[in-house]
Amino acid sequence: MDVINHCACLLLISLLLMIRLSNAAAATYNVMKYGAKADGKTDSTEAFVKTWAAACSSAQTATMYVPKGRFLLKAAVFRGPCKSRINVQIYGTLNAPTDYWALGNSGYWILFIKVNRLAVFGGTLDAKGSGFWACRKSGKSCPVGARSITFNWVNDLAISGLVSINSQQTHLVINSCNNVVVRNVKLVAPADSPNTDGIHVQSSTGVTITGATLQTGDDCVSIGPGTRNLYMSNIKCGPGHGVSIGSLGKEVNEAGVQNVTLTNVIFTGSDNGVRIKSWARPSNGFVSNILFQNIMMRNVENPIIIDQNYCPDNQGCPNQSSGVKISQVTYKNIQGTSATAEAVTFDCSPSNPCRGIRLQDIKLTYMNKAATSSCNNIGGTSTGVLMPQSCVH
Ligand SMILES: *[C@@H]1O[C@H](CO)[C@@H](O)[C@H](O)[C@H]1NC(C)=O
Ligand SMILES: *[C@@H]1O[C@H](CO)[C@@H](O)[C@H](O)[C@H]1NC(C)=O
């Protein structure tokens, strides 16, 4: 190759490279370019929303980029549909205003709505919930409180490495979504903070939650009506109220919960371990095909519980009987310690007894002795090692 050709060739290659790089650059949308300030004081809400709008209209895969630093964010809506796949990469910390009235009565802080193909990487959310909890405890009039991060009608969603602390209400909400993976999230609020659930899943299909650390003042995971094909593994829960299917059956017409697996979980000092809970009210809701397995309980108050007699203040439960039908629930290889004598409680509906409940290899102790169990309106089978003695036949 002669020198001229060689040079022309190199020039062409570098030109091509430059075009590629500039394309790649064009698909990254940095919040700093849209006016965000990483000082933790300047309101960056508008800058974030503008960045999202630009990323959302990108013709190619777009990354919304949040660098290190602290960003003050008020209630923010990130709305789709977008033209392409979107990645939100957060290296910094997002702070809510300390004044909880600033988030108003909208019920959300960060909201993604009607987006397809969305991935959220990293990020620390600090909702500064302590003022709000104090307001609620004082009995003063308070706003409804905000869920820290909510996904409504999002399909093909991946969330990984998210950290959320001190949420006012629930940390992370998956509502009306399909095909979701939540990986390695850490959600933390004090044990006595009211209604700070970790993850709430509702009206969603195909949700996987894996590798979560959940330390909350309410349910680590709460599973609402219309949840199907939910798989949860490698979770640490506690303090908190445990993993709860429900409360269900508050409404007469309600979608059921089906095909839920919870596996490889450690509960530490939580109020409940695995719970299914329904209102003692008429309802056509149901719970079926549930598997709880390979679970370690450490000093848990109600390690295994079905409570179909939920009726706070005894209001609105005409005959104290739940319409929710619970069937095909398996408890397999559940071990450890109960903080109360009764480790297994099955209090099913008199009008709709639990069916197909299976216990296999349960070993729960209370103060180094076998714990006890109680059964109401339940049918099923028990196999393997059973401590406490099973009352399910
Ligand atoms: C149950 O859910 C799992 C995901 O956890 C899924 O792979 C499986 O296909 C579902 N089963 C049915 C019968 O839908
Ligand atoms: C429960 O109460 C409702 C309304 O009072 C009634 O329609 C229903 O038949 C009752 N169900 C049972 C199982 O008693």
Image (cartoon, helix red, strand yellow):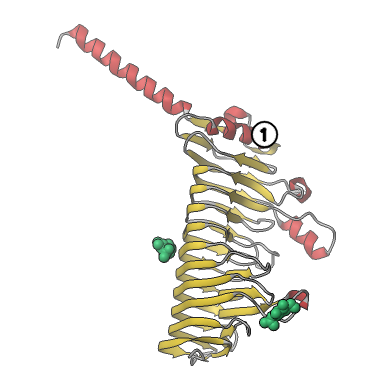
Residue 389, given in percent of the width and then of the height, sits at 48, 92
Q: Nearer the viewer, residue 205 or 109?
A: 205
Q: Is residue 234 left or right of residue 151?
A: left
Q: Residue at x 57, y 80 (%)?
A: 305
When the figure is inspected, residue 380 is found, relative to residue 146, above or below; the finding is below
Going by the numbered disc 1, the residue's amino acid type is Glu
* Residue 240 visible in this rendered orientation of the protein: no
Q: Nearer the viewer, residue 245 or 43?
A: 245
Residue 62, given in percent of the width and then of the height, sits at 48, 34
When the figure is inspected, residue 218 is found, relative to residue 330, above or below; the finding is above
Residue 342, given in percent of the width and then of the height, sits at 58, 88
* Residue 376 visible in this rendered orientation of the protein: yes
Circle 1: is it few (<14), some (14-19), or many (20+) Cα within 10 Å? some
Q: Quadrant of the N terminus?
A: top left
Q: Nearer the viewer, residue 274 or 98?
A: 274
- Tag 1 secondary structure: helix
Q: Which residue is mark 1?
A: 46
Residue positioned most to the top:
4
**Total of numbered circles in the picture?**
1
Q: Residue at x 47, y 62 (%)?
A: 229
Q: Quadrant of residue 377?
A: bottom right
When the figure is inspected, residue 20 is found, relative to residue 31, above or below; the finding is above
Q: Residue at x 53, y 90 (%)?
A: 371
Q: Residue at x 65, y 56 (%)?
A: 166
Q: Is residue 362 left or right of residue 37?
A: left
The picture quadrant for ligand 1 comes to bottom left
Residue 140, given in percent of the width and then of the height, sits at 85, 60
When the figure is inspected, residue 114 is found, relative to residue 37, above or below; the finding is below
Residue positioned most to the left:
1
